[in-house]
Each structure stands twice: as structure tokens, then as C-alpha cells.
Amino acid sequence: MRDRPFRPRLALRVTVLLTFGLLVGLFAPLSVTAAGLGPIEGGALPGPLPLFPPDNWWNLDISGAPVDPGSDGFIGFINNGSTRHLHPDFGGEESPGSTQVYGMPYAVVDGTQAKLLVDFVLYGSESDGVGVPFYPIPAQAISEAHWVEGGDPGNVDLRDSEDRHLLIVDRDNKYLYELYNVYYNTTTGQWEAGSGAFWDMKTNNRRPQGWTSADAAGLAILPGLVRYDEAYDPTVTAIQHAFRVTVRSTNGYVYPASHSAGSTVGALPMGARLRLKASKDISGFTPEVQKIFQAMKTYGLIVADNGTDMYITGTFDTRWDNGILNPAFGALSASDFEVVQLGWNPTTVLASLTSLSVSPTSVVGGQASTGVVTLSGAATGNGLTVTLTSGNPAVVGVPPSVTVAAGATSASFPVTTAAVATSTPVTLTASADSVNETATLTVTPAPAPKLSSVTLNPSTLRGGASSTGTVALTGPAPAGGVVVKLTSSKTSVATVPASITIAAGKSSATFTVPTKTVSANTSVVVSASSNGVTKTATLSVRRKG
């Protein structure tokens, strides 16, 4: 990662083609459904893919970018007087069931994974989450194999001989945490690392100038890995991102890198992009390898670390077959590539959809909510139109689309709802340029109406006359109506029915209160009760004469 005399064992491996690995590759599923599960080594990554917004530097189409004037010299430096061939720096286990592995493992956790304190011993001033519980490291990484780069558990100290990266994805929040040179110190009961970086994969959060990350160039590692799920999933028609590549020496850094790790004259800088020449014929390779090589033509390679020249980094996955990969990669050489103009960054980067939200997220049927779509940056041209759909239009309604005006990064839209009998969650979807974002709005039934009053008309009368009582609710009665119990404090003077039902859809009902003649003026309290609420009214009964 920095100028150092070692590289992981991956750079020195000898490929072993194993029947076991072939069988796993043929029969293992292409993806793992991670929703609702705990930490998973190599679990399913949160979509949409590729990781990070479409306009992120890892995902830029560089097929039309200009060639750097010094391209031939840089390629000559890599070839170093001979011909330097590509090598896949990834694979499965070194042997069936072994601790040591080829490639970069990664962990997928959910948003509830406990955050841990990491002690940074090398580059703390350029690391994120220093001094606080910040990194959601699975407990399995301490003592189990295959969670940390190289394969050995975290409690095995190999920091002097290996890079020991630990990559963690929070799938619920689309957060990426990457650590370099990790070790779990069993004496202190704490993780140690050389450096650490946090990435919100919904945004383009580049490191500050001069800062490293878990990689020497200051870039994220995971989005630049060659992944089995992309190469072998037939539903993925094209890999849409660049790949991480190492070279033996570097000289400074250029965009998108933010950190240097060498000053060798003639060498490429960190962040340099190499592109497989469009003229290179790749038709003779397997469809999966063609997919990888086409990505090298469209998105290229980004120099991210010092290591072995033209080593392409990928994930640890037992389904890889190095009997196919090694000769295929070895058929390409550095001379098949050209260097894109150093620091190339398109002047106009189109903003992409990054999120959809609703507020409030729960409403009573009939009430309104407000939706907001947010972009990765300011919309350009005539703005960006975002298509909107509701998973249940009978309950939640949205306009067909909303436009984020030029120069703006977000736009709001009205959300209408209808009355429901039971709590109903509805998924809303916003779509723009093949990016889909979702949000859930929960529509709840109206609260049961409560008794609001009981009145008497007239409230004063002569004994022997009748009054009319009225009970009222705070809203219309639900199906089946609402039963209201009635009582009189003096049944010898005034009587009421035992109860009265307010019909469904009605908010009040009346009843008759007959009285008897009295020898002296008296008062009678009429009480109405329903669902724990009691209301009263007083009837004044006067004597005749």
C-alpha cells in the first residue's frame, strides 16, 4: 500500500487447478440473498450496480477519452525491457479447505452490526472514525478464516508480510468501510489497523487531497474488484466499472487518486488510467472473460497501489477457475494498453439519482405526504426527469414523474393516500437513467371515533314532558356502528334507554328522555359511555304550577 518491501502472497502464487474448485464454480449459486441475515463473507451487495453513483470515477466510460502524450513511455516502463503480461490477482483457496486464499475477501453486514473502536497505528491522521466506535467489524473476522485478505483470521499478526485488508459493506445503508493492515490484538481485545476509510456509496465522497485510504492511492478498493457475480451472471450483460491494478513503482498522483506512494521517474502516478486498446481482438476468449476484457476497454484500469506490474485485483471466491483465468489474462500484455490522459475528468458529469424519501413516512388514509428525489449533483441542461410509480396506486398515488430543475439537486412531489381498513405499507419507486431508488409509505386506518358529547334539548322542562338526547362521536362510526350506554341518575324522575347505537357512517344518534311530574324542582344527570369515555348532561325538571 505504501512504499514497502512486501506484497501479499497473492503476488507470488502458483496457480493450482482443482476439480473441487471447478465443481463449486459450476454448481454454486451466482448470488446470495443477504436481506435479514447477519454478517456474510462475500454476501450479496446492495443494488443498483455498479457500486457508487453512475458518474463516480470508477464507473466512467473512458472509451473516448484522449490518450496521454506520454503513453508509450509509461507502457515501456511497465514492460521494463521485456513484455509484461496481465495476471488475475484473485481466485479461491490455495488448496481445498486451506486457510490461505487468493483475492480480496469482503464482508456484508446489516445496519444493526455493532460498531467497534479501531486503533490506528500508522496513518491515524488520514483515517476516518478515529477514537470512536465506528467500524462494523463482524466478530467472525477475529478467529475465522477468509474474512481478512490473505485468509488467516484477524488474530494472526501478519502485518509485516501482508497488506491484510478488511472490507465491510453495510448493505442497509449502502456504506463501505475499508481497513488496511489489520490485526486483532487479543491482549487488549481491540482491532488495530494501519489506516481506515469510510465511503457512502450513495455519493461521490472523494478523500481530501493528500489523504490515503485503505489503499495507497486514496481510493476505495471494493468498487474496483473483478467479481464473480458480475462476470458469470448471465443477467449482467456488461461490467460497468474500472478495475484496480498495481504496478511496481509510481510517481506522485493524479485525479481521481488523492495520495502518492512513490516518486520513481518514468513511472505512472497513482490514479492513472490504462485502457485496453479498442483494436485488441478479444473474441477468442470465453464469454465471461470477454465481459471482463470489454470492461477494460470501456472503463479501463486505475492504478491504486504499488505491487507487481499489471496484476488485476479481484474478489476471493471459490467459484473462480484459475485454469481459465490465468492463461486468458496472460494472453494480454501491457503493450495491449494505452494510458489515458493523466488526471482525465470529463468537464460535464451527468448527475444521477441517489435517493427517494417520503415525509412523513406514515400517514392516516386520506392524508398527504411529500416525496423528495435527490441527485448526486446538480442537474444539467433541461434538468433530469425522474419517473415515479406506486406499488399500490389504489392506496397511494404519485404523479407520473417529477423534474429536477437545472442547477438543482432535488425536487419534491405530492403523495396522496386513500382510506384503508388495515395498516398498508406501499413501496414507491423513482427511476432515472437505469437507476432505481425506493421508499416505503405506510398508510394506516383512521383511529376509532370517540364519544365527544351528550346533549339534551330542551335541557329544562316541566315534569311529564320529554326531552331529546343526542350522543355525538368525533367522527363517523365504523362498520357495525358504535354502541353508547346510557344511564339516569334519577330513574324515578327521568328514564333513558339502556343503550343506543350510532349507525355505521353516522356521527350521532338521538334518544327520548321521558320525565314524570315532580313536587319540587329537581336535576337529573344523564350519562353516556362508550369505549372508556363518559360524557354527561344535566336535565332540569320543574314542578307544575
Image (cartoon, rainbow, N blue to C red):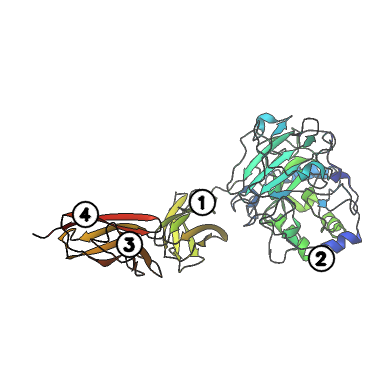
Q: Residue furthest front?
A: 519
Distance from Cα at disc 1 to Cα at disc 3: 60 Å
Identity of the amino acid at label 4? Answer: Ser
Q: Position of residue 267 (x, y in %)?
A: 75, 38
Residue 62 or residue 163, whichever sits in front: 163
Q: Position of residue 541 (x, y in %)?
A: 18, 58
The residue shown at (69%, 54%) is 37
Q: Are marks 4 and 3 in contact (CB under 8 Å)?
A: no
Q: Residues within 10 Å of mark 2 (few under 14, many from 20)?
A: few
* Label 1 sits on residue: 375
The residue shown at (15%, 60%) is 461
* Label 2 sits on residue: 27
Number of the front mark, 4 or 2: 4
Q: Are marks 4 and 1 in contact (CB under 8 Å)?
A: no
Mark 4 or mark 2: which comes first in sequence?
2
* Label 3 sits on residue: 486
- In the image, residue 43 sits, relative to residue 426, either above or below, namely above
Identity of the amino acid at label 2? Answer: Phe
Number of the front mark, 4 or 3: 4
Q: Are marks 3 and 2 in contact (CB under 8 Å)?
A: no
